Amino acid sequence: MKKRFNESKTADRMQNMNRFSSFIYHHPSFRRKTADRFTLIELLVVIAIIAILAGMLLPALNNSKISAKSIACLNTEKNLYLLIEQYEEESAGGYYIAAVRNSHNWANMMRRSGYLPAGVSYPKVIWCPGQTRKRLYTSNNKVYPYPHVEIGATFDYGVNNNLHPKYNASADAAKQTKRKFRLTQPSSVLKFADTKQYWVNYTNYNYFSFTHANKMNAAYQDGHAAPKMYFIKESVPKDDVFWGSDAKWHK
């Protein structure tokens, strides 16, 4: 008797469970959720759309990054221009700073005179934020992460050697450099630019570094800085105004 009762009870439970399952399955909310599920094809279509959008956006983001680094470089050049200008007025007697004097490059001379932080080998004002080249110094075969103030071959900015010459301390500076006020077109004459050396001139134009989307940033003698796409490969630039040749100076 007891066995039959248990069997009947179990059967009732099973019947109730079947009714509940049937109710859930046929309930509208359950059918809606099932219908809302993605099929494999739909999922693949969504992934393909995301990949296409990413392919369209990533180049734009990369261009924005390059542009931001170029703008940061221009700001750095403007700050460096002000420091060099201050040095030239206060310590160089109104003459252009020399590219090198007695084996001391222009940045090292500025540091020794207190215009760059003392004891700092890598002052940020001579770094180009967009520079990616290896700064290899062949004399010690060492690669430097940033421009070293005492090693001109690691510099990111080089001065116009036509106006900022190399000379010895024993020589008369007035004979080897030029006074700044004599320029007729200072807004067109190069002061310094993105380079791979601490100096550059029309015979060593390959020192220029076209870091920013195939352009270099250049600071001019009037204090403004702008990107420039200068020469064609295998041609020597002879732009008198750009280099500040004597033909374009006040007599």
Image (cartoon, rainbow, N blue to C red):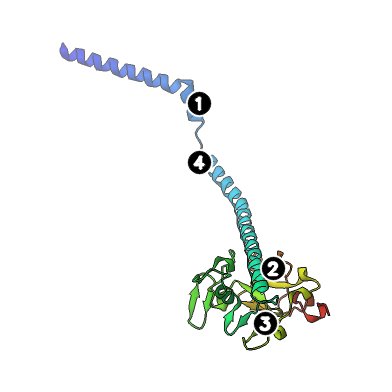
- The alpha-carbon separation of the residues under discs 1 and 4 comes to 18 Å
Please state if 226 lies on the left or on the right of 130 as rendered. Answer: right
Left or right of 160 on screen, residue 43: left
Which residue shows up at 56% across the image and 69% down it?
Answer: 116
**Which disc is residue 32 wearing?**
1
The 10 Å Cα crowd at callout 4, few under 14, some 14 to 19, many 20 or more, is few
Compared with 46, 108 (above or below) is below
**Residue on which disc 3 sits:** 165
Look at discs 4 and 3 and give the one toward the viewer: 3
Q: How many marks?
A: 4
Q: Can residue 208 be seen in this view?
A: no
Does the image show residue 67?
yes
Q: Which of marks 4 and 2 is nearer the N terminus?
A: 4
Labels 1, 4: front one:
1
- Mark 2 — residue? 219
Identify which amino acid the numbered label 1 is placed on. Arg
Residue 154: image x %, image y %?
Answer: 55, 75
